[in-house]
Image: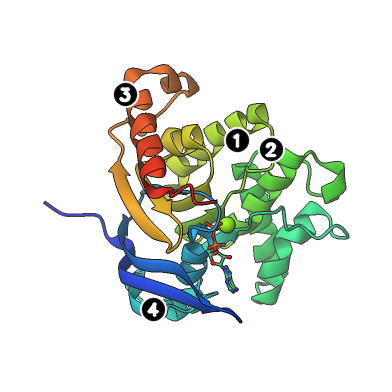
Amino acid sequence: MTQAASVVSAKDLCLTYQANDAPVHALSNVNLDVRKGDFVSFIGPSGCGKTTFLRVIADLEKKTSGDITVNGMTPEEARKARAYGYVFQAPALYPWRAIDKNIALPLEIMNYPAEERQKRIAEALDLVGLTGFEKKFPWQLSGGMQQRASIARALAFDADLLLMDEPFGALDEIVRDHLNEELLKLWARTNKTICFVTHSIPEAVYLSTKIVVMSPRPGRVTDIIDSPLPRERPLDIRETPEFLEIAHRVRDGLRAGHSYEH
Ligand code: ADP
Ligand code: MG
Protein backbone atom coordinates (compact mmCIF):
# COMPACT_ATOMS: atom_id res chain seq x y z
CA MET A 1 0.00 0.00 0.00
CA THR A 2 1.40 3.40 -0.86
CA GLN A 3 0.81 6.07 1.72
CA ALA A 4 0.33 9.72 0.90
CA ALA A 5 3.44 11.79 1.49
CA SER A 6 3.89 13.52 4.80
CA VAL A 7 3.40 17.27 4.49
CA VAL A 8 3.87 18.21 8.14
CA SER A 9 5.47 15.86 10.59
CA ALA A 10 5.99 16.85 14.22
CA LYS A 11 7.75 14.61 16.74
CA ASP A 12 7.89 15.60 20.39
CA LEU A 13 7.74 19.18 19.27
CA CYS A 14 8.14 21.72 22.07
CA LEU A 15 8.13 25.49 22.03
CA THR A 16 8.64 27.56 25.14
CA TYR A 17 8.35 31.34 24.97
CA GLN A 18 10.76 33.13 27.27
CA ALA A 19 8.44 35.71 28.76
CA ASN A 20 9.75 38.23 31.32
CA ASP A 21 8.34 36.61 34.44
CA ALA A 22 7.98 32.91 33.65
CA PRO A 23 8.45 30.67 30.61
CA VAL A 24 5.28 29.88 28.64
CA HIS A 25 5.05 26.30 27.39
CA ALA A 26 3.06 26.99 24.26
CA LEU A 27 3.69 23.56 22.70
CA SER A 28 4.57 20.52 24.73
CA ASN A 29 5.53 17.22 23.05
CA VAL A 30 3.27 17.58 20.04
CA ASN A 31 3.22 14.55 17.76
CA LEU A 32 1.33 14.85 14.52
CA ASP A 33 1.48 13.68 10.94
CA VAL A 34 -0.35 15.65 8.25
CA ARG A 35 -0.57 13.80 4.93
CA LYS A 36 -0.91 15.22 1.47
CA GLY A 37 -4.51 16.16 0.74
CA ASP A 38 -5.56 16.17 4.43
CA PHE A 39 -7.80 18.86 5.83
CA VAL A 40 -6.64 19.16 9.44
CA SER A 41 -8.39 21.36 11.98
CA PHE A 42 -6.84 22.48 15.24
CA ILE A 43 -9.39 23.18 17.92
CA GLY A 44 -8.96 24.23 21.53
CA PRO A 45 -9.45 27.17 23.88
CA SER A 46 -7.49 30.40 23.59
CA GLY A 47 -3.85 30.06 24.48
CA CYS A 48 -3.47 26.34 23.74
CA GLY A 49 -0.83 26.94 21.07
CA LYS A 50 -2.83 26.73 17.83
CA THR A 51 -1.37 29.87 16.30
CA THR A 52 2.06 28.96 17.61
CA PHE A 53 1.90 25.61 15.84
CA LEU A 54 1.01 27.23 12.50
CA ARG A 55 3.80 29.76 13.03
CA VAL A 56 6.34 26.98 13.61
CA ILE A 57 5.25 25.29 10.37
CA ALA A 58 5.63 28.64 8.60
CA ASP A 59 9.07 29.30 10.15
CA LEU A 60 7.76 32.43 11.85
CA GLU A 61 8.66 30.89 15.23
CA LYS A 62 11.49 28.46 16.09
CA LYS A 63 10.92 25.21 17.97
CA THR A 64 12.64 24.78 21.33
CA SER A 65 13.13 21.03 20.97
CA GLY A 66 11.84 17.99 19.11
CA ASP A 67 11.48 17.70 15.35
CA ILE A 68 9.33 19.21 12.66
CA THR A 69 9.49 18.82 8.90
CA VAL A 70 7.44 20.52 6.18
CA ASN A 71 7.41 18.65 2.87
CA GLY A 72 10.33 16.68 4.27
CA MET A 73 12.39 19.84 4.79
CA THR A 74 13.13 22.11 7.72
CA PRO A 75 10.55 24.90 8.09
CA GLU A 76 13.21 27.38 6.93
CA GLU A 77 13.91 25.42 3.76
CA ALA A 78 10.17 25.01 3.17
CA ARG A 79 9.58 28.75 3.60
CA LYS A 80 12.34 29.50 1.09
CA ALA A 81 10.76 26.98 -1.30
CA ARG A 82 7.42 28.81 -0.84
CA ALA A 83 5.79 25.68 0.45
CA TYR A 84 2.74 27.36 1.95
CA GLY A 85 0.21 30.16 1.76
CA TYR A 86 -0.85 31.75 5.07
CA VAL A 87 -4.24 33.26 5.87
CA PHE A 88 -3.99 35.32 9.04
CA GLN A 89 -6.57 35.60 11.79
CA ALA A 90 -7.67 39.17 11.07
CA PRO A 91 -8.33 40.17 7.47
CA ALA A 92 -4.88 41.60 6.85
CA LEU A 93 -5.65 43.53 3.67
CA TYR A 94 -4.06 46.91 3.04
CA PRO A 95 -6.88 49.48 2.92
CA TRP A 96 -5.11 51.72 0.41
CA ARG A 97 -4.65 48.96 -2.13
CA ALA A 98 -7.38 47.61 -4.41
CA ILE A 99 -8.05 43.85 -4.15
CA ASP A 100 -5.88 42.94 -7.13
CA LYS A 101 -3.00 45.00 -5.73
CA ASN A 102 -3.41 43.35 -2.32
CA ILE A 103 -3.08 39.94 -3.95
CA ALA A 104 -0.16 41.22 -6.04
CA LEU A 105 1.87 42.44 -3.09
CA PRO A 106 3.60 39.20 -2.07
CA LEU A 107 4.08 38.36 -5.76
CA GLU A 108 5.76 41.74 -6.25
CA ILE A 109 8.03 41.10 -3.28
CA MET A 110 8.99 37.78 -4.85
CA ASN A 111 9.71 39.48 -8.17
CA TYR A 112 7.13 37.73 -10.28
CA PRO A 113 6.92 39.45 -13.69
CA ALA A 114 3.82 41.61 -14.24
CA GLU A 115 2.23 39.23 -16.72
CA GLU A 116 2.61 36.23 -14.41
CA ARG A 117 1.20 38.31 -11.55
CA GLN A 118 -1.92 39.15 -13.56
CA LYS A 119 -2.46 35.53 -14.46
CA ARG A 120 -2.13 34.37 -10.88
CA ILE A 121 -4.37 37.13 -9.53
CA ALA A 122 -7.10 36.21 -12.01
CA GLU A 123 -6.84 32.52 -11.13
CA ALA A 124 -6.90 33.14 -7.38
CA LEU A 125 -9.90 35.48 -7.63
CA ASP A 126 -11.72 32.91 -9.71
CA LEU A 127 -11.06 30.20 -7.11
CA VAL A 128 -12.67 32.28 -4.34
CA GLY A 129 -15.50 33.61 -6.52
CA LEU A 130 -14.34 37.24 -6.56
CA THR A 131 -13.87 37.73 -10.28
CA GLY A 132 -15.01 41.25 -11.12
CA PHE A 133 -14.02 42.71 -7.76
CA GLU A 134 -10.34 43.28 -8.51
CA LYS A 135 -10.60 47.07 -8.57
CA LYS A 136 -12.62 47.37 -5.35
CA PHE A 137 -10.98 48.49 -2.14
CA PRO A 138 -11.24 46.30 0.98
CA TRP A 139 -13.67 48.70 2.68
CA GLN A 140 -16.05 48.30 -0.26
CA LEU A 141 -16.38 44.57 0.44
CA SER A 142 -18.27 42.69 3.16
CA GLY A 143 -16.32 40.91 5.89
CA GLY A 144 -16.83 37.58 4.15
CA MET A 145 -15.58 38.93 0.84
CA GLN A 146 -12.55 40.45 2.54
CA GLN A 147 -11.68 37.06 3.98
CA ARG A 148 -12.11 35.50 0.54
CA ALA A 149 -9.68 38.09 -0.79
CA SER A 150 -7.20 37.14 1.96
CA ILE A 151 -7.57 33.51 0.90
CA ALA A 152 -7.01 34.50 -2.73
CA ARG A 153 -3.79 36.22 -1.70
CA ALA A 154 -2.61 33.06 0.07
CA LEU A 155 -3.57 30.98 -3.00
CA ALA A 156 -1.68 33.16 -5.44
CA PHE A 157 1.64 31.35 -4.89
CA ASP A 158 -0.12 28.12 -5.73
CA ALA A 159 1.56 26.37 -2.80
CA ASP A 160 0.26 22.91 -1.98
CA LEU A 161 -0.10 23.73 1.70
CA LEU A 162 -2.53 26.31 3.05
CA LEU A 163 -2.25 27.50 6.67
CA MET A 164 -5.41 29.22 7.90
CA ASP A 165 -5.69 30.79 11.35
CA GLU A 166 -9.35 31.24 12.32
CA PRO A 167 -10.11 32.76 8.93
CA PHE A 168 -13.88 32.89 9.53
CA GLY A 169 -13.88 33.56 13.28
CA ALA A 170 -15.17 37.12 12.98
CA LEU A 171 -18.00 36.34 10.56
CA ASP A 172 -21.62 35.63 11.30
CA GLU A 173 -22.83 32.06 11.11
CA ILE A 174 -24.64 32.31 7.79
CA VAL A 175 -21.64 33.77 5.99
CA ARG A 176 -19.41 31.26 7.72
CA ASP A 177 -21.56 28.32 6.56
CA HIS A 178 -21.34 29.57 3.03
CA LEU A 179 -17.57 30.05 3.14
CA ASN A 180 -17.13 26.63 4.75
CA GLU A 181 -18.93 25.06 1.79
CA GLU A 182 -16.87 27.12 -0.64
CA LEU A 183 -13.64 26.18 1.09
CA LEU A 184 -14.45 22.46 0.84
CA LYS A 185 -15.11 22.86 -2.87
CA LEU A 186 -11.86 24.76 -3.33
CA TRP A 187 -10.00 22.06 -1.40
CA ALA A 188 -11.55 19.33 -3.57
CA ARG A 189 -10.74 21.21 -6.77
CA THR A 190 -7.14 22.10 -5.90
CA ASN A 191 -6.20 19.01 -3.89
CA LYS A 192 -4.35 21.14 -1.37
CA THR A 193 -3.37 20.20 2.14
CA ILE A 194 -5.00 22.52 4.66
CA CYS A 195 -4.15 23.24 8.30
CA PHE A 196 -7.05 25.20 9.76
CA VAL A 197 -7.44 26.74 13.21
CA THR A 198 -10.93 27.19 14.64
CA HIS A 199 -12.87 27.65 17.86
CA SER A 200 -16.01 26.11 16.40
CA ILE A 201 -16.82 22.43 16.85
CA PRO A 202 -19.29 22.24 13.90
CA GLU A 203 -16.81 24.02 11.65
CA ALA A 204 -14.00 21.63 12.61
CA VAL A 205 -16.16 18.55 12.11
CA TYR A 206 -17.72 19.76 8.87
CA LEU A 207 -14.40 20.64 7.22
CA SER A 208 -11.87 18.15 8.43
CA THR A 209 -10.48 14.76 7.57
CA LYS A 210 -8.53 14.99 10.82
CA ILE A 211 -9.32 16.96 13.98
CA VAL A 212 -6.58 17.82 16.44
CA VAL A 213 -7.98 18.67 19.88
CA MET A 214 -5.63 20.79 21.97
CA SER A 215 -5.54 21.99 25.56
CA PRO A 216 -3.61 24.79 27.27
CA ARG A 217 -1.02 25.13 30.03
CA PRO A 218 1.02 23.52 28.63
CA GLY A 219 -0.22 23.51 25.04
CA ARG A 220 -0.64 19.89 24.06
CA VAL A 221 -2.65 17.57 21.84
CA THR A 222 -5.29 15.67 23.78
CA ASP A 223 -6.98 13.84 20.93
CA ILE A 224 -6.57 13.27 17.20
CA ILE A 225 -9.73 12.18 15.42
CA ASP A 226 -9.67 10.73 11.92
CA SER A 227 -13.03 11.59 10.45
CA PRO A 228 -15.04 8.78 8.86
CA LEU A 229 -17.17 11.30 6.92
CA PRO A 230 -16.92 11.23 3.10
CA ARG A 231 -14.84 13.99 1.51
CA GLU A 232 -17.83 15.38 -0.32
CA ARG A 233 -20.12 16.97 2.28
CA PRO A 234 -23.36 18.84 1.81
CA LEU A 235 -24.11 21.24 4.70
CA ASP A 236 -26.93 19.04 5.99
CA ILE A 237 -24.42 16.30 6.79
CA ARG A 238 -24.27 18.20 10.08
CA GLU A 239 -27.57 16.62 11.07
CA THR A 240 -26.43 13.03 10.62
CA PRO A 241 -25.66 10.72 13.56
CA GLU A 242 -22.09 10.21 12.26
CA PHE A 243 -21.46 13.95 12.36
CA LEU A 244 -22.95 14.36 15.82
CA GLU A 245 -20.88 11.48 17.12
CA ILE A 246 -17.64 13.12 16.04
CA ALA A 247 -18.79 16.47 17.44
CA HIS A 248 -19.48 14.72 20.72
CA ARG A 249 -15.98 13.24 20.81
CA VAL A 250 -14.44 16.65 20.11
CA ARG A 251 -16.49 18.17 22.94
CA ASP A 252 -15.38 15.40 25.31
CA GLY A 253 -11.76 16.01 24.33
CA LEU A 254 -12.09 19.73 24.96
CA ARG A 255 -13.72 19.12 28.32
CA ALA A 256 -11.08 16.60 29.40
CA GLY A 257 -8.30 19.02 28.49
CA HIS A 258 -9.83 21.94 30.31
CA SER A 259 -8.94 22.50 33.93
CA TYR A 260 -11.56 25.17 34.75
CA GLU A 261 -9.05 26.81 37.05
CA HIS A 262 -9.97 30.35 36.15
P1 ADP B 1 -3.91 30.11 20.51
O1 ADP B 1 -3.67 30.50 19.08
O2 ADP B 1 -4.30 28.68 20.68
O3 ADP B 1 -4.88 31.02 21.19
P2 ADP B 1 -1.15 30.94 20.89
O4 ADP B 1 -0.36 29.99 20.09
O5 ADP B 1 -1.37 32.29 20.35
O6 ADP B 1 -2.54 30.24 21.31
O7 ADP B 1 -0.46 31.11 22.33
C1 ADP B 1 -0.08 30.01 23.14
C2 ADP B 1 0.48 30.56 24.46
O8 ADP B 1 1.71 31.23 24.21
C3 ADP B 1 -0.41 31.58 25.14
O9 ADP B 1 -0.30 31.40 26.53
C4 ADP B 1 0.18 32.90 24.69
O10 ADP B 1 -0.07 33.92 25.66
C5 ADP B 1 1.65 32.58 24.62
N1 ADP B 1 2.38 33.39 23.62
C6 ADP B 1 2.08 33.51 22.31
N2 ADP B 1 2.99 34.27 21.67
C7 ADP B 1 3.88 34.66 22.62
C8 ADP B 1 5.07 35.45 22.60
N3 ADP B 1 5.52 36.00 21.46
N4 ADP B 1 5.73 35.62 23.77
C9 ADP B 1 5.30 35.06 24.92
N5 ADP B 1 4.20 34.28 25.00
C10 ADP B 1 3.50 34.08 23.87
MG1 MG C 1 -4.56 32.02 17.89
Q: Which mark is residue 242?
A: 3
What's the distance in space between the residues labelled 2 and 3, CA to CA? 27 Å
Q: Secondary structure at mark 2?
A: loop
Indicate which disc, 3 or 1, sits on the residue closer to the N terminus: 1
Ligand 2, image quadrant it occupies: bottom right
Please name the colour scheme applied to the rendered image: rainbow
Q: CA distance from mark 4 to mark 1?
A: 32 Å
Q: Amino acid at mark 1?
A: Leu
181 vs 79: above or below: above
- Closer to the N terminus: mark 4 or mark 2? 4
Few, some or many C-alpha atoms within 10 Å of disc 1 (few <14, some 14-19, many ≥20)? many
Q: Are marks 3 and 1 in contact (CB under 8 Å)?
A: no
The part of the image, by quadrant, that contains residue 36 is bottom left
Q: Is residue 252 visible?
A: yes
Between the residue at mark 2 and the residue at mark 1, the CA separation in whole angstroms equals 10 Å
The residue positioned farthest toward the left in the image shown: 1
Q: Earlier in the sequence, mark 4 or mark 3?
A: 4
Q: Which residue: 47% across, 79% down? A: 62
The amino acid pointed to by label 2 is Leu
Residue marked by disc 2? 171
**Mark 4–mark 3 distance (CA, rounded to whole Å):** 37 Å
Q: Are marks 4 and 1 in contact (CB under 8 Å)?
A: no
Secondary structure of the residue carrying numbered label 3:
helix
Q: Classify residue 72 as left or right of residue 127.
A: left
Point 32% across, 30% down: residue: 229
Looking at this view, is 241 or 107 the one in front?
241
**Which is more foreground, mark 3 or mark 1?**
3
Label 4 to label 2, Cα distance in Å? 34 Å
Residue located beneath label 1 in the image: 179
